Image (cartoon, grey):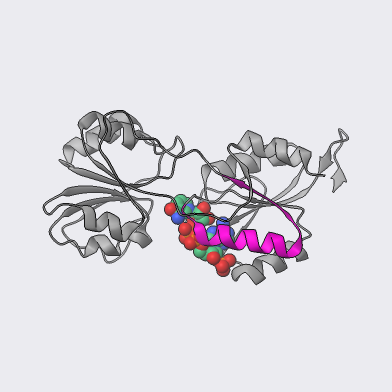
Amino acid sequence: MSMGNDGTATRRILILGGTGEARALATLLVERGHTVTSSLAGRTRQPERPIGAVRIGGFGGVAGLAAYLDAYRIEVLIDATHPFAAQISANAAQAARAVGVTLIRIERPQWKRPEGAQWIEVDDMDAAAKVLPGGANVLLTIGRQELAPFMARADCRFVARMIEVPEGVPERWRVVAERGPFAPETERALMQAEAITHLVSKNAGGDQTAAKIEAAAQLGIPVVMVRRPLLPPALVAHSVADVVLMIDGVG
Ligand code: NAP
């Protein structure tokens, strides 16, 4: 810990990122004089870069992350990864414990079923693919590494929306390469233009991609909602502002 010009404590902070919250948090913490490095997995070719220092690529498991925390004398580790990035969250919990670094995880509130909407909740992508009825015309809003179970459903048609166009997608699929945020009107227009009968989504939560839930409810389109994975216990913040308060309180 060192002191900023205004006498407040400044810290060496590592943010595990890849989300809008992580970028917002990096900006706020840099503004407050902290020494901030954001870590990205390196999955997207043109990531939105956070303010402050950025490192890209895996650490090499728990041991690699623990070694990084130690080598860079990180004082606070913030897990601001996507709620479905369960491996890195588990690694963060173990590595932080191993080297005695404070870990704060941001957990955005989950999406709730709008009144009257049809939701089919499932535990994973395999279950989501199985629950679709034959002949369904499905809007898939999942990552490109999660498509395999749906490719096995040759009896359904898929419109897959994701940040980058993946390889190996069947010819009859339509891929829409787009990055959020999305508005309810454009979500409705997409669902209507493609005659969508089912939406598949992870319960990511947050504002950036919530419009599809509203649009599906308005159009009476059932949502196959994949539940969040369980994450290890951690000090949890529910917003970026909460994290800033917690960091001020770290002794
Ligand atoms: P994951 O399955 O939890 O992690 C797999 C491995 O990727 C980790 O063991 C780690 O490798 C590396 N990794 C993940 N996040 C990292 C980070 N921020 N910095 C450095 N290495 C990281 O992760 P995922 O679900 O593939 O997600 C990858 C990234 O995309 C995350 O940063 C996440 O926030 C973002 N993202 C994910 C989703 C999603 O739905 N999963 C959606 C939007 C954004 P090592 O073991 O070698 O350290």
Q: Position of residue 197 (x, y in %)?
A: 17, 42
Q: Position of residue 195 (x, y in %)?
A: 15, 40
Q: Is residue 242 above or below residue 58?
A: above
* Residue closest to the eye, 229 or 169: 229
59 vs 210, left or right, is: right
Q: Is residue 85 above or below residue 10?
A: below
At x 56% / y 41%, what residue is drawn?
Answer: 21
Which stretch did the figure color magenta? 84-106
* Residue closest to the eye, 233 or 215: 233
User: If the image is split into quadrants, where does the C terminus sit?
Assistant: top right
Q: Work out whether residue 251 can be spotted.
A: yes
Q: Is residue 179 above or below residue 7?
A: below
Q: Is residue 78 above or below residue 45?
A: above
User: Which image quadrant is residue 115 in?
Assistant: top left
User: Which image quadrant is residue 71 in?
Assistant: bottom right
100 vs 218, left or right, is: right
> What is the magenta segment's predominant secondary structure?
helix
9 vs 149, left or right, is: right
Q: Work out whether residue 43 can be spotted.
A: no
Magenta-drawn stretch contains 126: no
User: Which image quadrant is residue 249 in?
Assistant: top right
* Residue closest to the eye, 110 or 146: 110
Q: Position of residue 102 (x, y in %)?
A: 73, 52
At x 76% / y 64%, what residue is drawn?
Answer: 70
Q: Position of residue 178 (x, y in %)?
A: 35, 46
Magenta-drawn stretch contains 94: yes
At x 71% / y 39%, what residue is drawn?
Answer: 246
Q: How many marks?
A: 0
